[in-house]
Amino acid sequence: MNSQSILSVGAVEKYSYCPLSWWLSREGAEEEEETLAKGERKHEVVVKDLKGIETHEVRAHEHETIVLYFAVAATVAALLGVTFLQNITVRIGEIVGAIALIWLLAACYFLYKAEMLATEKEKMVAERVILIFAMVATLLAVYMVSASFIVDPILSHVTEVVALMWLIGASFFLYHSIRGFELARVLRRKHGLMDKIVDYYDDQSRNTELFISEKYGLRGRPDYIVTQGNYHIPVEVKTGRTPKGPLFSHIVQLGAYCLLMEDKYDMAPPYGILRYEKTEHEIEYGIDLKNLVTNKLIEMQDVLKTGEAHRNHNRPGKCIGCSRRSVCPEKLA
């Protein structure tokens, strides 16, 4: 199937709303500027929130890592401060050696866990933790040997102050980590997103890769995708009025996104999600919806060949809401 016959999911939605409206949009009929501008502004708000979730969570994880660094530094400094004291009645070297062994065993555990994890991102995080634990174990082992020969009360006080400063720094970054996760949680709850966001469509990005199915002659990208197990669930956000129930054209559009997910990942999602301003609907994706979408694609290819499209309804109210009403030759009064 050549690239010229590959249809967009947006075109499928327009065709399902009214074939003539879709055809006029292909012929260059101008949209109602105010309606489009309002929809784009609302969509930008959604995208901004999705970016916010990603940004807050990334920063929160970064702060968690910094907390670990600061905590490690505070621990080492505190142990050094203890070893610098006079009249120590416990065998500090043995204590530090035991702690070093614990950190080394922890590094081995994360090494095993890294090999068992599924994604490269998780492996990268585990490898960083391994490095940190191994470094700390090495430092503690060195201190076990060297620090036991140093006795200096002043140096002990200095290192304890340093340890306290590092602990304060750890507390600072811990606060920001918790705050970041809380902000992300609020945004997730706002959009009903307690699942992990895989990706989202940003209108401002010129390099956003689309899902393309040569098999069905279809291309497009949902507003964002969430994962549930191995399933990739497409989510489409509608920024206009909230209807009493999901509109037919929106259902077909979501079905088209499900078809792309099935073709891309070789696994059909059990449903897709339609989000309106005041509610959301889980639309079941089965053989009936799949056949509906593929039949629409066949019809659209036929229209492209014949060059003829006509209004498919007798609803004046629907015509009034159409953005191509002003140039439609079959509009209802």
Image (cartoon, rainbow, N blue to C red):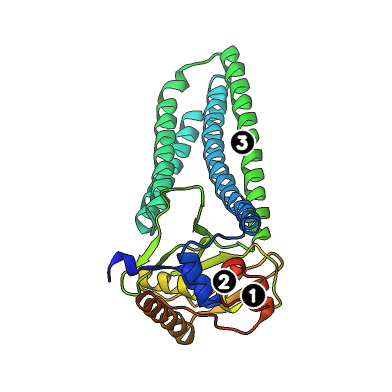
Q: Where is residue 21 in the image (x, y as percent from the top left)?
A: 53, 72
Spatial CA distance of label 2 from label 1 is 9 Å
Q: Residue 319, which numbered label?
A: 1
80 w.r.t. 31: above or below: above
Residue type marked 1:
Cys
Residue type marked 2:
Cys
Q: Nearer the viewer, mark 2 or mark 3?
A: 2
Quarter-wise, where is residue 275 in the image? bottom right
**Answer yes or no: do the residues labelled 3 and 1 have beta carbons within 8 Å?**
no
How busy is the neighbourhood of tag 3: few (under 14 within 10 Å), some, or many (20 plus)? many
Q: Is mark 2 on a helix, strand or loop?
A: loop
Q: In this view, does 325 lie to the left or right of 317?
A: left
Spatial CA distance of label 2 from label 3 is 60 Å
Q: Quadrant of the N terminus?
A: bottom left
Q: Which of 57 and 154 is in front in this view?
A: 57
Q: Residue 51, which numbered label?
A: none
**Sequence-wise first label, 2 or 3:** 3
Residue type marked 3:
Phe
206 w.r.t. 272: above or below: above
- What residue does disc 2 label? 328
Q: Which residue is drawn at 46% across and 29% down?
A: 93
Q: Residue 173, which numbered label?
A: 3
30 w.r.t. 294: above or below: above
